[in-house]
Image: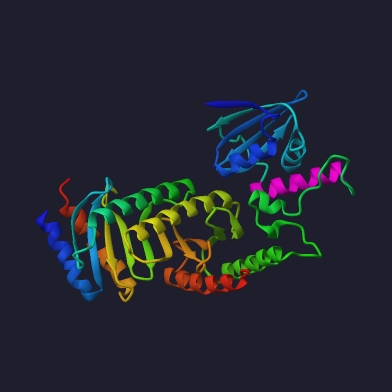
Amino acid sequence: MAVQGNLSEISLTDLIQLNCQSGMTGRLTVSSRGRTAQVFFDGGVIVHVTQGEKSGQEVFYEILGWDSGVFTLESGILTPTQTINARCSDLLLGGLHQLDEKSNPKEPAPGQLPLPEDVGELFGFEKSNLPETEDLSTEDTMAQNMQEILMELTEEVPGLLAAAVVGMDGLPVADVARGPVNIEQISAQMTLLIKLVETSTEKLDAGTVQDYLLTTDKAYLLLHFLGNTQYFLGMSADRSKTNLGKMRLYNRVFAEKLIAAMPR
Amino acid sequence: MAKLDDILIDVRNQLGSDFIATDVVGMDGMSIAGSSANPDFNADAASARFAMVMKLATKVATKVKMGEVEDSLVTTDKTYILTRFIGDGSYYWAITVTPEATLGVVRMLMDEYADQIWDAIPH
């Protein structure tokens, strides 16, 4: 089923962000001023963008600047090829920076606001993907510390696929992953699950949840609350390559480190 | 179903004083067999709640392409709650033990008895 709309009702950036977060597989066709582009999603990851003869990441950055036109969203259509291998959040952030540089190399044009410094928070990106600045805020430093701790974690746990610090609002604060994964989608799904587990144990008077382990035929997913905070550490590891005992041990150890890195 | 009850009694005996409760539950959230060391334990509520958890876990695993759910473990300050799908996945088996229980042993017991439990359910 196709959904059609106008870019005057929703911006292309918001539309792409929504498709990424919902884990969409399909095609977004955008037409603006005689030009037509197609963006292909696979499980919420942008895998291919094409406009005429051109394709790839640069085309994606170019079309992000289209502020008028119409779009058609068709789910279930698979990409004919893959020309992009980057996370949705990275692509959008890169595109926004390019747009900002093109339209406003130094000073904001009259009536145009500069890209907010906390753009990362607005889109649920991890701050470590933001360009480094001389004057880091406390929150920036916190996110960088967490990112470093997660990087250390990947070196300790064999078979680790991804790890993230996620708020109970479902947004990741910091994350690391081996290969392209839709961390926003995974974070949101993990949050849904741990919220239900928390509610269930509370209603059954079974105590305060410390962690939750899900085992599938392929992987382990371990979610560990970071103390009394509204955040948890989520880790996913390849079951054939990891050791569950070691994974739980490092999960506890690194949870303590992350708690210490959080602002009080 | 007497065979199923016998198996659960056997499991309970092996867990000794660490045992809190066990239930074999359909994915409709209804327990078909179980026992508890605590007479106040609300098996109906626990069965229904964790059927919801197992269903959501399955949906999440599918959505994030993690594969087919086998089991889950909730660790709280009071308990370990282990749940695992049995047979064709139309039932799950839950065991609740104290935090003093040896987790590896409980997981091993569940591995050992899962097939027997499935065989004991009329289907």
Which residue is most to the top?
A34
Q: Position of residue B29 (x, y in %)?
A: 27, 48
Q: Quadrant of residue A165?
A: bottom right
Q: Does residue A105 appear to the left or right of A190 in the view shown?
A: right
Identify the image's colour scheme: rainbow, by chain, secondary structure or one colour. Answer: rainbow
Q: Residue at x 18, y 65 (%)?
A: B39
Q: Is residue B37 visible?
A: yes
Which residue is most to the left?
B2
Q: Does residue B38 appear to the left or right of A137 in the view shown?
A: left
Q: Does residue B108 appear to the left or right of B14 in the view shown?
A: right
Query: Does the stretch in magenta take in A109?
Result: no
Q: Residue at x 17, y 71 (%)?
A: B13
Q: Position of residue A149 (x, y in %)?
A: 61, 70
Given residues A236 and A106, the one toward you in this image is: A106
Q: Residue at x 27, y 45 (%)?
A: B28
Q: Does residue B113 appear to the left or right of B78 in the view shown?
A: left
Dominant secondary structure of the residues highlighted in magenta in the image: helix
Q: Residue at x 48, y 49 (%)?
A: B65
Quadrant position of the C terminus of chain B in the picture? top left
Given residues A2 and B30, the one toward you in this image is: B30
Q: Quadrant of residue A264?
A: bottom right
- What is the span of residues highlighted in magenta in the rendered image? A85-104
A167 to A49, vertically: above or below:
below
